[in-house]
Amino acid sequence: MADVLVQEGEEPKLSKKELNKLAKKAQKASKAAEVKMADVLVQEGEEPKLSKKELNKLAKKAQKASKAAEKGGNQQQSASDEQEDYSKDFYGSYGLVNSKEKKELNFLRVKEVTAANASKDIWVRGRVHTTRSKGKNCFLVLRQGVYTVQVAMFMNEKISKQMLKFVSSISKESIVDVYATINKVENPIESSLSLPLPLPKLPLQIEDASRRAPTDEEKSNEQENQLAVVNLDTRLDNRVLDLRTTTSHAIFRIQAGVCNQFRNILDARGFVEIMAPKIISAPSEGGANVFEVSYFKGSAYLAQSPQLYKQMAIAGDFEKVYTIGPVFRAEDSNTHRHMTEFVGLDLEMAFNFHYHEVMETIAEVLTQMFKGLQQNYPDEIAAVGNQYPAEPFQFCEPPLILKYPDAIALLRANGIEIGDEDDLSTPVEKFLGKLVKERYSTDFYVLDKFPLAVRPFYTMPDAHDARYSNSYDMFMRGEEILSGAQRIHDADILTERAKHHQVDLVKIQSYIDAFKYGCPPHAGGGIGLERVTMLFLGLHNIRLASLFPRDPKRLTP
Amino acid sequence: MADVLVQEGEEPKLSKKELNKLAKKAQKASKAAEVKMADVLVQEGEEPKLSKKELNKLAKKAQKASKAAEKGGNQQQSASDEQEDYSKDFYGSYGLVNSKEKKELNFLRVKEVTAANASKDIWVRGRVHTTRSKGKNCFLVLRQGVYTVQVAMFMNEKISKQMLKFVSSISKESIVDVYATINKVENPIESSLSLPLPLPKLPLQIEDASRRAPTDEEKSNEQENQLAVVNLDTRLDNRVLDLRTTTSHAIFRIQAGVCNQFRNILDARGFVEIMAPKIISAPSEGGANVFEVSYFKGSAYLAQSPQLYKQMAIAGDFEKVYTIGPVFRAEDSNTHRHMTEFVGLDLEMAFNFHYHEVMETIAEVLTQMFKGLQQNYPDEIAAVGNQYPAEPFQFCEPPLILKYPDAIALLRANGIEIGDEDDLSTPVEKFLGKLVKERYSTDFYVLDKFPLAVRPFYTMPDAHDARYSNSYDMFMRGEEILSGAQRIHDADILTERAKHHQVDLVKIQSYIDAFKYGCPPHAGGGIGLERVTMLFLGLHNIRLASLFPRDPKRLTP
């Protein structure tokens, strides 16, 4: 992409700029407008520029004054030499936009600045992505979401020296309104007006934050012109700026898509959305890793999962429920895939006779979701891949279901020493994912029948072999994204298992009571939203998939 | 509804019951089945019963044995006198359903038990809603979600005395599987098999919990046969049972509908769903009413709203965002409309020149939502109205927008003494709602331009009158459901206002920093999900609209 003005044969152009800071009648922004990836994406670190030939062409013709300057502005900040500034009515700062008056500027979206709209006089609002000033001309790249467009200004009878100076001094990331003509060849500029100026020194540059990290090979090549890459902490410390990158926009649109797909698929299957409380009277998972909350004169805890509440909804005859909400884990884990707060996509379902009715449903739901994401977000997936290259996510239908003992056998056959009832460590999980990918060509699979000893107290033991349980995990690219099981729905057995796990019975009494008045057999699972996003896209750190991540060391912003 | 077997001319009937507790091949339950209100709703407290004539008809003919008894059961609990019990293979308990084997019982949903399926031999699973035993016959009402069906059994050559005794002793709320023929007139019964029996003594009866509370007039009439009504605390203490009522099912389906409508309407308008963290480093609303959390060696707080994060997403150029999630308020308010944890439907939107662009959008979104709810949930709304009678929710288009000073004038004209810059107390809000309803025939309206003094520090002051602000509340049936405003998007003014409100600047530094790098003007609001549900339906207490409510005195279940 050598030139954002000429995109893949379409030649979207922005020219003739006229500023009118003056009042016009109120008109609401187009609310139906959607920001979607297209061919105007800013590519990593390549500076959008015009060729000399094009610059000459552009400079050829000046444009006559805007007919729009209807009223004199009263918040105008004049350029240095006001007496001589014949453009003074065509630029300036809005000052604080505090809804003083309703205005009617019919903004075109940056993505709509295309050849199809050539010759139109338009208003456009965008951020100053880059500025380039050179003698008697000035070029701004305006950014709106993931779209950019170049604006060209040349000194002429409408555009004064002072105006050019004003425009070229606008800080990056300022928001400006521009009045201009979209024109394929003739692009004279007349005016520009900016919203309040942000601080000139940015803690990170959007271009740097958008750049692909060098591969190890590239690093070792000692290239002369290696460009800055923003590290994760700097990104997160300045998350608002980092969120402005194309990659961040794409990641969080895909993440919204995960939630949307999950809900739509479950709604179509007759599930009901419920809301589970986050403040609870007792640790839900046995007491470890729970955050304590001061609750008036007493104390309470933050829910480590909505599970008990999903189950109570099942006992309340809701049959199939799901809930999306925050989940809290006071684990002092500082890894690429742990956070202290994350979003759980949880579901629970009554079944007739066998928990596989549920397990298979969940695996189908996820498979359907992967398909939906690939269908609906191809541009976003590609945009993320530009900065964080990854193999496309692969899955098979029907989903692969592997029995735990078979996984152990597969691992042993490949040199891993592991006992029948051992849990899988993270590296072993990853290795297993690699073996599964080689053998079955899928990045997604289900591991069924975990050893009872490694699962929570409410997990139903296997009916045939006391060492195992009716529980399962699901994996993406070798990392766990879901943990689930048939839950014990009998109060007596639940009490017995809770005792065995040394859970304080007094504190979970209302949970146990829920099963005293008849509860259908049921199973379910909890999915980590950020893990799904991270692993679907092949990101290397879960924090990239959390808008404002929380870990043992990060509570801000 | 004198007889659930004969519904409004449709005569759905369930007859010929045969029990087969024995293994059949695995077949998954229909996952596409949806529970919807229909004409088989159990009405308040009226006992479903058959007329004598019908009973005679039903008893007339016995049915031959089930062809289904294929295998001997091994978990069977025999009746008292096994030698003489010729039905012993046709009833019993499943024992624990721990996924020992996959079975293939093609259950019909209770709602599908209609005349259209007459003469079919079917399996049906449901809860024992009521039992009525009388000499040589026995009637069960089975309930599945909000649907019920009556099952009739008569002693005959297939149904032994012991079997009848077993069935008539099944506790209410047990889950039973029944094999039967749907038949308009001939309904002999053969067998019944129940899942593990819940405790026989229920802390509340589903019929009692479903009953409409008597009006004051009814109470004063000292009727002889006033029936038990379950009070709120008993309901909430035994929420799992209370959730089984038709009313609870309807309330939470409508609540899921509120979320669904909100998201769909905003998605169509180009909003992006985001997730905001709940653990934060500083109180977001100025320090009062915030829950403190132990966070490793330090402490943190629970977010009182996602507002700062929505705003940072706007500063990150997401333009229009929404989020649905829990909101925490450490207020010691024990009222009908306060909870310490509730679900916020929050949205935030950049605008071009005036916050009314946003305010009007929100009011339109809510209006569209009301329409969607009335269109999609008429049966659920009617079901709730049966137990909690209320006038249908009324609204106008376009939505009514009232200026604060005009509201004050209206109140004064109706005898309320109130200052120009006073906030509205709850009773005054309600009275205002009444006046608005009388004058404008709407239960929904927007109150615009609140006094600056009564709003949070981040509220944009009015550009023309320093006493007021660019802020608004929205009301349903005279109670506030949304609070919103244009936010200050300028770091310096924000700092100044925070100081004025004595907010600790150090703690909100990352919030203030978010506005240093350019932020478009924006406004938004937060809606209380449970309040919308409560007020749309005209419920009298917000706890009825929360699955597991939290207040200063309630942390369980």
Image (cartoon, coloured by chain):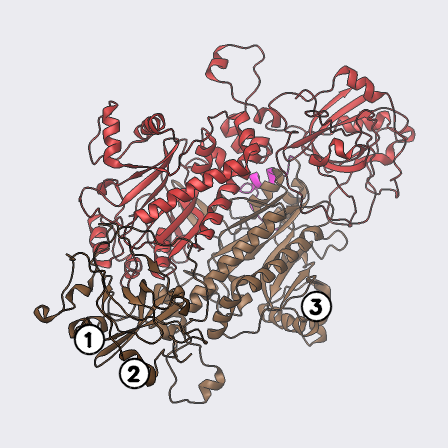
Chain colours: A brown, B red
Residue type pointed to by label 3: Ile
* Secondary structure category for the residue under label 1: loop
- Same chain for the residues under marks 3 and 1 in the image: yes
Which label sits on residue A408? 3
Chain of the residue under the numbered disc 1 shown in the image: A
Return the x and y of residue A342 as percentages of the image width and height. Answer: 48, 57
B253 lies left or right of A74: right
Seen at 46% across and 41% down, the residue is B369
Residue type pointed to by label 1: Asn
- Estimate the spatial distance between the alpha carbons at disc 3 and disc 1, rounded to whole Å: 77 Å
Q: Residues within 10 Å of mark 2 (few under 14, many from 20)?
A: few
**Residue beneath disc 1:** A156
* Secondary structure category for the residue under label 3: helix
A360 lies left or right of B215: right
Asked whether A166 falls inside the magenta stretch, the response is: no
Quarter of the image where the N terminus of chain A is located:
bottom left
Q: Residues within 10 Å of mark 1 (few under 14, many from 20)?
A: some
Residue type pointed to by label 2: Asn
> Is residue A212 in view from this perspective?
yes
Q: Residues within 10 Å of mark 3 (few under 14, many from 20)?
A: many
Chain of the residue under the numbered disc 3 shown in the image: A
* Secondary structure category for the residue under label 2: helix
Return the x and y of residue A546 as percentages of the image width and height. Answer: 45, 61
**Residue beneath disc 2:** A56
Image: B51 above or below B162: above
Return the x and y of residue B268 as percentages of the image width and height. Answer: 47, 52
